[in-house]
Image (cartoon, helix red, strand yellow):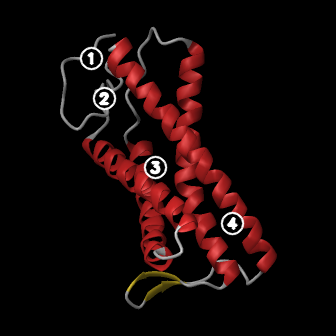
Amino acid sequence: MTRSLRFNLPARLLHWNMAALILAMLFIGVAMVTSLADYYVLVALHRPLGILILLLAAIRLANRWRHPPPPLPLDLPAWQRHAAHASHIALYGLMLAMPVIGWAMLSAARYPVALAGPIVLPPILPQSPVLYAWLRGLHTVLAYALFALILAHLGAALIHGLIRRDGVFSSMALRAAGPRTR
């Protein structure tokens, strides 16, 4: 069985929708800590979007296991292959960890994680101001790490799309481009 040179359609749809959601979450998070006037509106958006990202990341990971990604170009240096693999592990780890840490942080503070209307998630940790403070710091540090990783991912995508032109960028594009060269 030969593997496709493109990600399957669900992977591509999840990728681009989650990219928009994650960038929105990062900007909402920054706005939450800098704006007192809009804080409650932003938190009301941030909590359910975080849980949505958690669910979509789990679906995306299951899809990736069922439909492995296309192979990288054969002429890609080994260090770049390792960097690509490590960065994808880190991205998936952060997409899963950030919402869980946020949920745990709010649980430790006894703040409800309201999704929509009367739907509220149960706490996953006991109340603890010390744990809340530690998790809040961790959530912030990981958000910066996620932003840096996204910038590196974007940079690599642009190198593949504009400089190498090796088909890696088009393998995740929603529309098919020309044939991928090897």
Q: Amino acid at mark 1?
A: Arg
Kind of element beneath mark 2: loop
Image coords of residue 65 (percent x, y): 45, 44
Decide which of tag 4 and tag 3 comes sooner along the chain.
3
Q: Amino acid at mark 3?
A: Leu
Within 10 Å of the Cα at label 4, are there few (<14), some (14-19), or many (20+) other Cα atoms?
some
Decide which of tag 2 and tag 4 comes sooner along the chain.
4
Decide which of tag 3 and tag 2 comes sooner along the chain.
3
Query: On the image, numbered disc 4 is attached to which residue?
Result: 136
Judge depth for marks 2 and 4 and give the one in front: 4
Query: On the image, numbered disc 3 is attached to which residue?
Result: 61
Query: On the image, numbered disc 1 is attached to which residue?
Result: 180
Asked whether residue 158 is in view, the answer is yes
Residue at the (45%, 8%) spot, across then down: 75
Q: Are marks 2 and 4 in contact (CB under 8 Å)?
A: no
Q: Quadrant of residue 6?
A: top left
